[in-house]
Every structure is written in C-alpha cells, then in structure tokens.
Amino acid sequence: MSKLDAVKETLNTLRAILAIVAAFLIAFGGVAGSLYDKGNMGLLFWLSIGLIVVFVSMGFLAMQKIAQKTKEIEEL
C-alpha cells in the first residue's frame, strides 16, 4: 500500500469516528434535555452531561487529526 493510500485510509477512519461521535452527542443531548425537562437531575442526567463533554473533546481531537492528515495529503 502506498503512503498516499495509507493516509487516505486513516482520514476516512477519522471521518467515520467523527460521525459516530456526532451520533453519540445527539443521543446524549436528547437524554440530558429530556431529563432536564422532566426535572429529573439525578445521576443519569449528570452522567449524560459528563459524556457530552467527553464526546465534544473527542470530536475536537478527531477534527485536529483530520486537518493534520489533510495537510499531509497535500504534501504528498
């Protein structure tokens, strides 16, 4: 496999990860919003808020890696 193909494959994997992270953000945002609307601010609410923060961080990391790999493709 050439270097260009390897970088493209990594880039596609990072894009898939970003899509999965977005799906989890939507799901946990819905859970948190629903629990907040019901006034149920228990453990599940705070756990979903914590997971939202984690997935947002993962999304930013994935976007940084995507930008890095895109620049790497431009150099090849």
Image: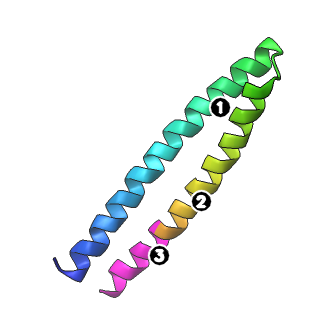
Name the residue rendered at 74%, 19% in the picture.
35
| Callout count | 3
Identify the residue at image location x=52%, y=62%.
63
Query: Which mark is drawn over residue 60?
Result: 2
Query: Where residue 17 sits: x, y (%)?
Result: 43, 52
Q: Position of residue 20 (x, y in %)?
A: 45, 44
Residue projecting furthest to the top: 38
Dividing the picture into quadrants, the one containing residue 40 is: top right
Q: In the image shown, does 40 or 4 lie closer to the viewer? A: 40
Determine contact: label 1, label 2, CB under 8 Å.
Answer: no
Above/below status of 39 relative to 69:
above
Mark 1 lies on residue: 29
Q: Residue at x 56, y 30 (%)?
A: 27
Task: Give the farthest residue toward the bottom.
Answer: 75
Q: Name the residue type under label 1.
A: Gly
Of the 4 image quadrants, the one containing the N terminus is bottom left
Q: Which mark sits nearer the N-terminus, 1 or 2?
A: 1
Query: Percent from the top left, x then y, of residue 12?
Result: 33, 59
Q: Amino acid at mark 2?
A: Phe
The boundaries of the magenta stretch are 66-76
Secondary structure at numbered mark 1: helix
Indicate left or right for 9 with 64 as reference: left
Asked which secondary structure carries label 3, the reply is helix
Query: Which residue is most to the left?
Result: 1
Q: Look at mark 3 in the image and give the residue it sits on.
A: 68
Chain-order first, disc 3 or disc 1:
1
Q: CA distance from mark 3 to mark 1?
A: 29 Å
